[in-house]
Amino acid sequence: MSDVNDMNDMNGSTQQAPFDSPTSEFCLRMARAWAALSRRLDSALGGHHGISFADYQLLLSLQRAPGGKLRRVDLAEKLGLTASGVTRSLLPLEKIGLVARQSDPRDARVGYAIITSTGSELVTNASVVVHNVSRMLLGAPSREQVESTSTLLAQLAGGQ
């Protein structure tokens, strides 16, 4: 029986897949894990707080920022979105009062997204849901496992 990493060639013999490696397998597993995690968090956050996991990440970034505000371009970079992508993400949150716009009095080209007190309260409450889902999915890994994996993920995300 051939290994899953082997491929049959036209003569029926097997050869190693040219790009199979522990690092590519890790990336594939990480993508599947991200998809599963996002689905679970979207469902839980939507059911409890009416927001998506992407909304939560955006609100949390604003809450953690100095003064609860970030330039839209900085928020886009932090979230891995384009400037127009972050604008589209902010619009529904603005409509329900979780974030607001603020212009820079010195430079009309610069726009800030600022979290409102309602948005800050919601993200604080939603953090409990995120914590509970995370613990349920991860179990109880050692601190060392979490830190080493977190370091690797930060490296993949460009140090963020």
Image: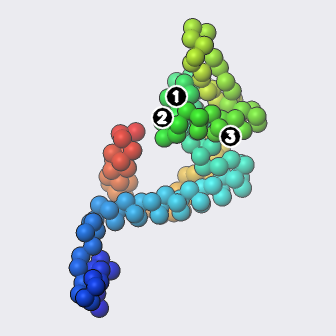
Residue 8 x, y percent position in the rendering? 29, 83
In 3D space, how far apart are the residues under numbered discs 2 and 1 (Cα atoms)?
A: 6 Å
Residue 113 x, y percent position in the rendering? 61, 27
Q: Nearer the viewer, residue 115 or 19?
A: 19
Do labels 1 and 3 touch, CB within 8 Å? no
Judged from the image, the secondary structure of the residue bearing numbered disc 3 is helix
Vertical side of 74 occupied by 132: above or below: below
Name the residue at 27% across, 73% down: 17
Name the residue at 76% across, 34% down: 95
Residue that mark 1 sits on: 73
Residue that mark 2 sits on: 77
Residue 92 x, y percent position in the rendering? 72, 38
Q: In which quarter of the image is residue 16?
A: bottom left
Residue 40 x, y percent position in the rendering? 59, 60
Q: What residue type is labelled 3?
A: Leu
Q: Which of 130 and 94 is in front in this view?
A: 94
In 3D space, how far apart are the residues under numbered discs 2 and 3 (Cα atoms)?
A: 23 Å
Q: Quadrant of residue 104?
A: top right
Q: Tell me the mark number nearer the camera, choosing from 1 and 3.
A: 1
Judged from the image, the secondary structure of the residue bearing numbered disc 1 is helix
Classed neighbour count for the residue bearing mark 3: other residues with Cα under 10 Å, few (<14), some (14–19), many (≥20)? some
Res 90 visible: yes
Query: In the orientation shown, which residue stands out farthest toward the bottom?
Result: 1
Residue that mark 3 sits on: 122
Tell me which numbered mark, 2 or 3, is placed earlier along the sequence: 2
